[in-house]
Amino acid sequence: MSRVPLDHHLLRRLVRQLKPWTGACITALVVIMAGAALDTAIPLITRHAIDVNIANHDSTGLLHTVLLFLGVSVVGFVLHFIQQVLTGWIGQNIVLDLRARLYRHVTRLHSSWFDKHPVGQVMTRLTNDVENLNELFTDGLILIFQDLLVLLFIMGALLYMNWKLALVLFAIMPLIFLSTFQFKRLVRAAFRRVRALVAEVNTFLQENITGMAVVQLFRRQERNRDTFSEINNRLMREHVRTIFYFAVFFPLMEVLGSLATAMVLWAGSGSVLRGELSFGALVAFIHYAERFFRPIRDLSERYNILQGAMASAERVFETLDEKPAITSLDNAQTPVIQGKSGSIEFRNVWFAYEDENWVLRELSFFVQAGNSAALVGYTGAGKSSIASLLLRFYEFQRGEILVDGLDIRQWPLEELRKRMAIVLQDVFLFSGSIADNIRLGSQLSDDELEIAARRTGLLDHVRQRPDGFDEQVGERGQNLSVGQRQLISFSRALAENPAILILDEATSSVDTLSEQRIQHATAELMQGRTALVIAHRLSTIRRADQILVLHHGKLVEHGRHEDLLEAQGVYHRLWQLESRRGVTG
């Protein structure tokens, strides 16, 4: 498929990013036009000095011409300064807006998008790719207009002075266009490969740094270094390939420029000797010949920037064009609930992460508001998928899921999630203070914060720290124990005061003392709330109001602990397996 239509499409989208700063762009273009006109006037001033002032021995006139030359140069310097400040300001504001839009959009995308896009790749789009676009807006798009304008002014001046000699200079243009076209084709492909490999390097680094403990435990350092070296070498080879293209192209432009100047010098000297051209005009022509190839070389450099930006723009706009699969309906309304809130109902729900590889099949159950339900089953039975669907991280394909009698697709998404809180085995903490990590979704006062921490048993740990709630937890809470991180997660859930509480075996990673504190806090938290407990240890869910037993995505049994044991079914087999391992004792 040809890439030309895509180039034009991307270029139009890039130009549209300038719209909010139209006034600044127009000012920059006016400054650029004035600067281009002054730049074109300098060789004409030189011609006047030679052919008029020097030829007529007019020292006063020569002084005036020299002062004019200096004045034009100073004004050109000021205009160039204004242009640089304006284009830099425009570029930085566009990138500020684009990066904010990209981040805001990424946070609205559905979970399945993140399943298919590694963190390193997403990071590359938010950082490296956006920065490439910064260079385009600062040194690319607007300055391309400047180069084209200077080129047109010079061509006009050349044709005005001597059209025959101008045609000698223009004769070299076909070679320039041919070289530029070939350069464009090769560099575009090379830049696309470079951007893909940069994303691959970032992904590999992110995974290995995050999982360094596992890498070291399984002695993968050497093998992972070899893998990284292979990716890194491929990136280096692609960079070297682009360097080679530039190393050939720019010297070739210099050679073609020198060839054109030599042709002008040869043909122009003959015209001077024959009296058809003044000496001052020849000097001006040679100056113009040198200046003629400067914007062409600059255009090539701008094209280099444009190619890098095109490769990045493809990825940035691809992300921005990704439609959030899970959103609130336009007419979504929070229902008015009479009595207790938090009832959950699944009606004949079918769900698959991909195609028709069903994870849940014909799943139906009901949890009354204020009751607890435990989900049990072998690994892969679909327990965690139920929680993900309830929170609308994924969309189910068939059936209905209702919260408080209303299909969750009819709820405003933010309101639905505000009614729920989830505590996972693997707690994620953000860089910041302990208080910041508890207040993630709420505006707790200091007193409310302390109450939430006391109810979970976290307050004792906080008081032992020099800065209390202002203690910095570091990246992912690495300076806290697993139990302390879990207690923060419980305090976070308490702070939300949810109608529905989802627990993914939240006590499995803590010590005995912390587990006792959490179990006490959990019992208090579950009072009057609907609780959905994903159970890995059956001993923790014996008091649940109902136990839902899943097998291959289907609900095969449900009831209370004693009734399910008597039924001698799947739950009984799970209980026996844990009993043999000494887990349920």
Image: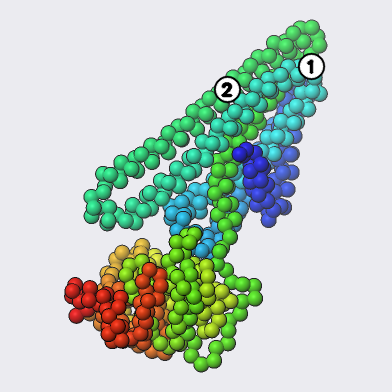
Residue at the image position 47 percent from the left and 82 percent from the top: 344
In the rendered image, which quarter contains the N terminus? top right
Picture quadrant of residue 237 = top left
- Above/below status of 126 relative to 54: below
**Sequence order check: which comes first, mark 2 or mark 1?**
1
Of 324 and 44, the residue lying toward us:
324
Q: Secondary structure at mark 1?
A: helix
- Above/below status of 108 relative to 498: above
Residue labelled with disc 1: 164
Residue at the image position 81 percent from the left and 11 percent from the top: 276
Q: Nearer the viewer, mark 2 or mark 1?
A: 2
Position of 346 with respect to 292 (left or right) is left
Mark 1 surroundings: few (<14), some (14-19) or many (≥20) residues within 10 A? few
> Can I make out residue 489 in this image?
no
Q: Position of residue 381 (x, y in %)?
A: 37, 69
Residue at the image position 43 percent from the left and 77 percent from the top: 421
Residue labelled with disc 2: 252
- Above/below status of 153 relative to 469: above
Q: Secondary structure at mark 2?
A: helix
Picture quadrant of residue 568 = bottom left
Position of 399 with respect to 165 (left or right) is left
Mark 2 surroundings: few (<14), some (14-19) or many (≥20) residues within 10 A? some
Q: Residue furthest top?
A: 274
* Amino acid type, residue under disc 2 in the picture: Leu
Of 469 and 308, the residue lying toward us:
308
Q: Position of residue 33 (x, y in %)?
A: 74, 39
Position of 528 with respect to 53 (left or right) is left
Q: Position of residue 571 (x, y in %)?
A: 30, 78
The Cα atoms of the two marked residues, 2 and 1, are separated by 25 Å
Residue at the image position 34 percent from the left and 40 percent from the top: 229
In the rendered image, which quarter contains the C terminus? bottom left
Of 158 and 534, the residue lying toward us:
534
